[in-house]
Image (cartoon, rainbow, N blue to C red):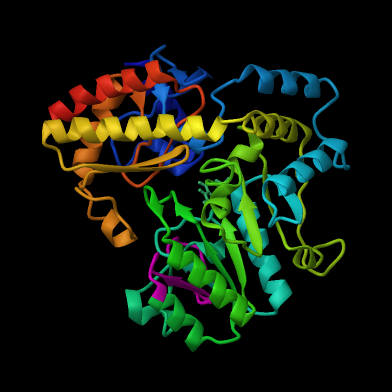
Amino acid sequence: MSRNQQLFERAQQTIPGGVNSPVRAFRSVGGTPRFIERASGPYMWDADGTRYIDYIGSWGPMIVGHAHPEVVQALRETVDRSFSFGAPTEAEITIAEEICKLMPSMEQVRMVSSGTEATMSALRLARGFTGRDLIIKFEGCYHGHADSLLVKAGSGLLTFADTTKNAPSSAGVPADIAKHTMVLEYNNVEQLKEAFAKHRGEVAAVIVEPVAGNMNLVRASQDFLQAMRDLCTADGAMLILDEVMTGFRVALGGAQSLYGIRPDLTCLGKVIGGGLPAAAFGGRRDIMAALAPLGGVYQAGTLSGNPLAVAAGLTTLRLIQKPGFHDALAAQTRKLADGLVALAQAAGVPFSADTVGGMFGLYFRAEVPRSFAEVTQSDTAAFNRFFHAMLDAGVYLAPSAFEAGFVSAAHDDAVIAATLEAARTAFGKL
Ligand code: PMP
């Protein structure tokens, strides 16, 4: 039995499903999860000593590659001064200044420890500030696992006419909470307009992934985001861009800079922690003033602004501001996607791919999807076979057909070429 298998069996004794976050368990692709021992640059090594080219990058944070020497150095320098005080530090001001500089829609920012906390807190703030309860989210978007956000639509268009039909997508979420979350179709402008017309003055916030990365990768159309901005402004609702994944990843200024959309609030995570637990939410100064200790919306955290997390995040934010960083990252990501499409075509496999900055989507269908419904039409069985063929060849893709992939600055030409060589064989086997 491989050491990965041994560890997986042992893990299941004391950890539900053997993992601390569900998708790690390889449930949808089958097989044994790899237990990772170490990683460096674009590579990870598992418990059996096998090396993989990593296209997960901890689901986004590792944008400068694993164990980047400057991040390691920053952590070393910080750790000796102890690593949690429960009192403010200067580094927290510096990272706040840095974030507000890079994303000018964020006039003030509050640090938290996970993306879930960021979105949950942003929703509470939007509700507290507007005095309204209703939230609009979109099918296929994931915003962490707070109760209000684990909700899916009952049935498409009819559903939003009656918000009580919205069903929780997890056991344990009270229907009384889910009924305040309306779920609409991603990229459906008409439906959004209709929802605002029906619920004038009731919507606290619209929350959206401006480039969706939790239903594989699906870009929002410019019209969709613009309509959202206009409708929110006209109705006094808050527009929350969830840039936990896209922030500093699709462009230095996030998706909001690509689309030219100024949200009222933004949620950040992943890259701003550089691989340590840090996330943030922020936006308009007048809204942020409603937060405790200034205002009546409570929000707090024992480890918020943790010195190690801030040190890793700050160093990562500095590294990605080097001239040309995102252009190079986007070019490598494009090279990977174009290469895969060409290989699939040569092998006669229905396949398409899309990229935005350092994020990519691989689809086992002929055309790039524009909605959740289209994403679900891809051939998951083909993906699963491709995933395992790639894994066997030393390339670690996300273990699900419905997750985006991530490239880091350490993925150089040789790494991309090695990936494509593995893919040539993998597509051939399909
Ligand atoms: N929002 C988005 C867009 C995400 O991709 C994620 C995590 N993948 C979250 C929120 C939740 O972040 P976390 O896992 O840190 O709680």
Count of number-bearing discs: 0
> Which is nearer the eye, 293 or 47?
293
> Which is nearer the eye, 63 or 294?
63
> Which is nearer the eye, 325 or 89?
325
Answer above or below: position of 254 versus 50: below
Residue 152 belongs to the span the image colors magenta: no
Identify the magenta region: 169-189
Can residue 35 be seen here? The reply is: yes
Residue at the spot 31% in from the left edge and 16% down from the top edge: 1
Can residue 136 be seen here? The reply is: no
Location of the C terminus (image quadrant):
top left
Q: Position of residue 38 (x, y in %)?
A: 52, 18
Residue at the spot 87% in from the left edge and 38% down from the top edge: 89
Q: Position of residue 148 (x, y in %)?
A: 55, 66
Residue at the spot 88% in from the left edge and 42% down from the top edge: 87
> Which is nearer the eye, 400 or 210?
210
Q: For residue 377, what is the image quadrant?
A: bottom left
Q: Position of residue 22 (x, y in %)?
A: 44, 43
